[in-house]
Amino acid sequence: MSERDIDQQLVSRAQRGDKRAFDFLVNKYQRRLARLLSRFIRDPAEIEDVTQEAFIKAYRALPSFRGDSAFYTWLYRIGINTAKNYLSASGKRPLLSGDYEDEDGDTVDLSAQVPDLNTPETEYMNRQIVETVNRAVDALPEELRMAITLREMEGMSYEDIAQAMDCPIGTVRSRIFRAREAISAQLKPLLDTAKNKRW
């Protein structure tokens, strides 16, 4: 049985009034949703509040969930919209946090283009690459930043991103391509320097 099937069974039980089933979904996705929202909101207390508000909205909207998309795709859409509304109401600009860690504390491998040598120079270069990528992602327009975050950080499929962002899949592909191009343009000088420089 797939994750989607398990989620659908829990949703069906929750729709019939089983609060424990919805609690299980909250426990399953709370950290993931908070991690996603932390890419747009900096303050941990605000992230917690917006995450909780998103789950409340999801619970209230649960009777209308038909299963056309995966539960987490539907939940992420609610979470993103809740974060957008929160930021808009508070007059804040969406910002990305600087860390690229998942819930297990593993960092995203941004050093694939740099030789894997455990030297101070390569460690410094790896840090430079991570900082450059973070700055480049921070500078992206919101729609591009959201698309690349859902793809690269959350590992969502193009289809799921299209549903979460409520746009055609071609638009998602275009946004991810443009985001990658912008990030590559920022990395190119750094990588060219690293390749040609003698330590």
Image (cartoon, grey):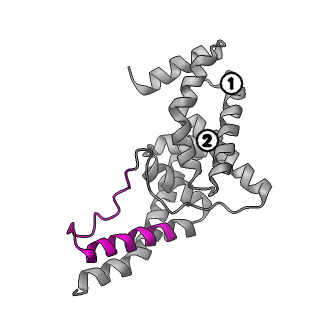
Whether residue 120 is situated above or below residue 90 in the rendered picture: below
Question: Which image quadrant is residue 52 in?
Answer: top right
Question: Which image quadrant is residue 195 in?
Answer: bottom left
What is the number of the mark on residue 77?
Answer: 2
Q: Secondary structure at mark 1?
A: helix
Residue 68 visible: no
Question: Circle 2: is it few (<14), some (14-19), or many (20+) Cα within 10 Å?
Answer: many
How far across and how far down the image is residue 102, in percent? 43, 48
What is the number of the mark on residue 64?
Answer: 1
CB contact under 8 Å: marks 1 and 2: no
Q: Nearer the viewer, residue 90 or 174?
A: 90
Q: Secondary structure at mark 2?
A: helix
Region rendered in magenta: 106-135
Question: Circle 1: is it few (<14), some (14-19), or many (20+) Cα within 10 Å?
Answer: few
The residue that appears at 62% across and 58% down in the rendered structure is 42
Q: Quadrant of the C terminus?
A: bottom left
The residue that appears at 52% across and 21% down in the rendered structure is 8
